[in-house]
Image (cartoon, grey):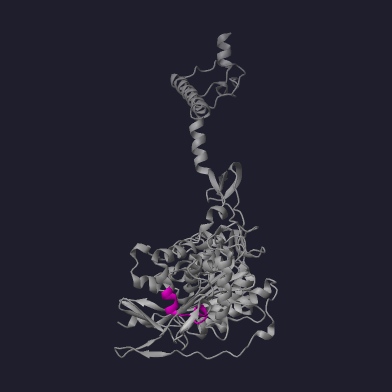
Amino acid sequence: MMGWISRGTSKADRPVAGRRRGKSNGTSRSGLTRKPEAPTSSFVQRSWIFSVLMLVGAGALLWKAYTLQLVDSEFLKGQGDARSLRVATVAAHRGRINDRVGDPLAVSTPVDSVWVNPKEISRSAEHIPTLAKALAQSPEDLAQRITSNSQRNFLYVSRRLQPSDAARVRKLDIPGVHLDRRYYPAAEVTGHLLGFTDIDDNGQEGLERAYNHWLAGEDGAKRVIQDNLGRTVQTVESIKPMRAGRDLALSIDMRVQYLAYRELKAAIQANRARSGSVVVLDVDTGEVLAMVNQPTFNPNDRSQLKPAAYKNRAAMDLLEPGSTIKPFVVAAALSSGRYTRDSLIDTSPGMIKVGNKLIEDKHPLGQINLHTALARSSNVAMTQLAITLGPQVLHDALVDFGFGRVTGSGFPGESAGLLSKAAHWRPITTATVSYGYGLSVTPLQLAHAYATLGSLGVQRPVSFTRTETPGGGQRVIDAEVARDIIDMLEGVVTEAGTGLRAAVPGYRVAGKTGTAWKASAGGYATNRYMSVFAGLAPASDPRLAVVVVIDEPSAGKFYGGDVAAPVFATVVGDALRLLGEAPDAPLDDFSDELPEITPTFARNTNGRSAVLAGDSGLPAGEVRQ
């Protein structure tokens, strides 16, 4: 049977080598099942290697996760914070400076603001489109705003800029364009008084520096998150709160300040003078109502911030006061008990010799009382008083009035003046000090001394801040003596005196002229003068003490009565009306016919001409051996 089967099997039914196997399920074409092949050893080996690698990788990932989350978490958090977390400063807003009625004199903005000087930028108008582009403004509109304000020195063109925008404008460096946080509305009118701040808003000069601790405040701090460009993304927490600066109320009355500025500037120009100062004090309180200098500077213009420009001459510059010192010599004489207001002094023959120096009056006055001695500004009479009193008494009297020491105002850099010890005085020193040579004072010191006279002998410290109630002060001379001196000084502002041009219609004025040669190498320059007028008004009950100083007038006139007195008259007259002071003299008592005063010359033994003393207080005897 088996053979039959073998014979009955066709060739096609036999398996042929190389033919495709049956289906993948192991079933052959004939329907028979084959036994699957066993895996090779190489396949098993690769599987084991792959599994091990997978396990190792998983273990490494688990270990890394463990170290990141637990072992190194604090370190990594610190590194992340170091790259994005920052401590930012919260800048303290600087306090405002106001005048006595609250008008702003210095203000700060919390962010950068752009302002221009229309006069300056108009000269380089080609930069206006560039500036407009940086500020994202219309060039036409910006140009129109600038040109329409071409007479001004200040114009805001953009405020509250972002730091990046401010940096872009600053980089342009366009003349007349400024970015400042501190702004002074009165500009040069208060420049020397207020001073200025630096780029970080710290006071550098003037009252900005004196009261920096009050105005500056304290910066705060906060923690913020920043992006890779340094921009703040989120504020995390406040670390230290910011304390804003406090506002400062000054004693300055801007109405009086502007009056003094205007009149001084006009006088400097009219007399072609080198410089000048005006100081106005309130007699009752010691407050500074006005203080101006010429030439001045604009603190808003950084290009003007040079030491020679921003020096406050009224508080720092020294001058020999000339005849304006004479009222204090007379006060010392009256206080000593050796003289009364009716005492007579024989000045004949109009000169006196001290050592080898001859001191002269402008005109021989003969026998005169103290009233005439002040009204006619007699150097001979003052010399006799000083020599009689002695150096120590005279020195102590001048110290009591504040000479040789600071006024207590606290103004940065204020000078104490120069007043040597009495032990060092020679007889000629005693004589020359009596008419204003051999000592140096500041305009502020001189005004302070006159204010002490005006308050009837009570000396109050000078104050640049508003005083609610007058301080008690310290009495330096009797009220009766001070009243006598004021009455005598009224005679100066008459036709018989040297200060008629200081008269004010409707008000009684007490004052003193002074004209001094300026010191130079080896002596005095007889062609360079310091013209001064110091006085009080109203004389019946003084409210204002005012000093006017004109340095080196060169337009032909140089006497204090001609150059400084008219400035005093205008400032005092307008100021008294602004302050509401009632007139204390009838208007018809004032004569507007002012005498022409020409210098009188005398011939020295050496043939040179010298201006004689008298109204001027010049030491005529100094040039004669």
Q: Is 91 contained in the magenta span?
A: no
Quarter of the figure with residue 551: bottom left
Q: Nearer the viewer, residue 431 or 132?
A: 431
Q: Nearer the viewer, residue 404 or 163?
A: 404
Taking the image as drawn, is residue 333 in sight? yes
Above or below, comparing residue 357 to residue 60 in the picture:
below
Above or below, comparing residue 81 to residue 567 in the picture:
above
Q: What residue sits 53% from the left and 44% below the top?
A: 86
Q: What residue sits 35% from the left and 73% below the top?
A: 428
Q: Nearer the viewer, residue 119 or 491?
A: 491
Quarter of the figure with residue 114: bottom right
Q: Which residues are magenta?
A: 372-384
Residue 553 x/y as whole percent:
46, 83
Magenta part mainly helix, strand or loop?
A: helix
Residue 373 x/y as whole percent:
49, 79
Quarter of the image that includes the N terminus: top right
Q: Is 378 contained in the magenta span?
A: yes
Q: What residue sits 58% from the left and 56% below the top?
A: 94
**From the viewer's perspective, is 587 left or right of 546?**
right
